[in-house]
Image (cartoon, rainbow, N blue to C red):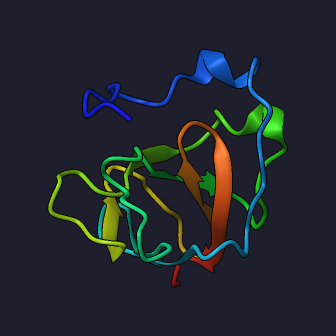
Amino acid sequence: MSQNRPAEPDIDELSDTTVQHKTGSGYSITGHTTDDGFAVHYETPDRHEPYGDWDWIAVYRGNEVPDDADLGNYINWNWTCPNEQCGHTGIATIPNAAHESGEAYTLVYFTWKWNVVATDTITAPA
């Protein structure tokens, strides 16, 4: 894949894409709230490169992954790896994603374009 990744995932492409759900395929995430968003510890298969493969993570309200047609309705998202110096394990941040105390949020790890490979549901602390 070229290193000229787009500025953001193309929501318009979602309607033309068959979303693949491959959870349990060597990817895992564990999320935590931060003052202004979320921090997500991720692990991918050993030879996978989150930067070069354009992996990204989105956060949704509620305690389940949205239906495929609603995956574009995330609160916010960020690249798993913002620079070439990330490995197959690390911590990604999703800033500017306000959360409310006691509310559930679902984090979804995508490989390019809309392939769901890992999820985690957390509840914001009271």
Task: Report how many numbered discs are placed on residues in the image.
Answer: 0
Q: Residue furthest right?
A: 67
**Which part of the image, by quadrant, shows the N terminus?**
top left
Q: Could you say which is closer to the camera, residue 47 or residue 122?
A: 47
Relative to 77, say whether 5 is above or below: above
Residue 102 locus on image (x, y percent):
62, 77
Residue 51 locus on image (x, y percent):
30, 51
Relative to 54, say whether 23 is above or below: below
- Residue drawn 31% across and 54% down? 95
Residue 105 in view here: no
Relative to 116, say whether 42 is above or below: below
Q: Could you say which is closer to the camera, residue 86 or residue 47?
A: 47
- Residue drawn 76% across and 19% down? 15
Residue 23 locus on image (x, y percent):
73, 68
- The picture quadrant where one finds residue 38 is bottom left
- Residue drawn 54% across and 74% down? 101
Relative to 30, say whether 21 is above or below: above
Residue 97 locus on image (x, y percent):
42, 52
Residue 87 in view here: yes
- The picture quadrant where one finds residue 90 is bottom left
- The picture quadrant where one finds residue 88 is bottom left
Q: Residue furthest front?
A: 47
Give the side of residue 121 with respect to residue 97, left or right: right
